[in-house]
Image (cartoon, rainbow, N blue to C red):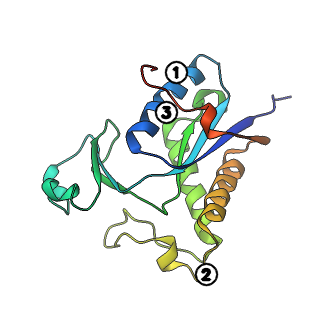
Amino acid sequence: MRARRVLEICRMGVINYADALKLQEKLVLDRKAGIIPDTILSLQHPPTYTLGKRRTDHNLLIPLSDLKKIGAQLHYTQRGGDITFHGPRQAILYPIIALREMGLGARLYVEKLERTMIELSSQYGHIVPCGIANKEVTSLKREAEVELPAEDVVQDRLVSCFVEIFGYDSTVWKDSDSLMVSEGET
């Protein structure tokens, strides 16, 4: 008989990218040490561009000097890929989960993330995801066949799709204040 798989979910609201990254780094260490169970951060960012390992500054649609004028931040990251925009009203999940305990490799993990997004999209009609050749970046709001509910409802449905696709038995919602990393903590 397998152990019950519990996922702690923390609804964070809008949080600065750097603060969210710092929190993720702390939680990853805590998860590896077995201090916390699998955890997911559900949040949004203020306007932010991130450049991954394959970054090329010339791929920015907006000159670096103009980012501050429009109130956007730029962060260089260690993730794969090139440029990504994160912004208000964009549902973001940051899973901090033990893939080995779940028997998942990187490929199956990414496939499950993709299925999570497809499942959410299918609840509102079906959209062509970004990243597919000859398809422009789109949004659920623009492509949905029905009027979307409030942002927090969409965000919670995204969490529900994740829980279902990844096969968690139960969930626990946590207060975001209990997770915040204070200055000097790593």
Quadrant occupied by the C terminus: top left
Q: Which residue is mark 2?
A: 147
Q: Which residue is mark 1?
A: 29
SS category of the residue bearing label 2 = loop
Residue at image x 40%, y 65%? Answer: 130
Q: Which residue is tagged 3?
A: 24
Residue 55: horizontal and vertical position, in percent?
21, 46
x, y percentage for residue 176? 61, 39
Q: Return the disc, 1 or 2, that comes first in the chain's sequence.
A: 1
Q: Amino acid at mark 1?
A: Leu
Q: Amino acid at mark 3?
A: Gln
Give me the residue at 37% from left, 65% from top.
132
Q: Secondary structure at mark 3?
A: helix
Q: Position of residue 162 (x, y in %)?
A: 64, 51
In the depicted view, which residue is nearer to us: 102 or 92?
Answer: 92
Task: Kindly report the distance in space between the C-alpha atoms of the residues bearing marks 1 and 2.
Answer: 40 Å
Q: Quadrant of the N terminus?
A: top right
Structural crowding at the residue carrying mark 1, measured as other residues with C-alpha within 10 Å and reported as few (<14), some (14–19) or many (≥20): some
Give the x, y percent position of residue 125. Answer: 60, 77
- Give amino acid for label 2: Glu
Q: Which mark is residue 146?
A: none
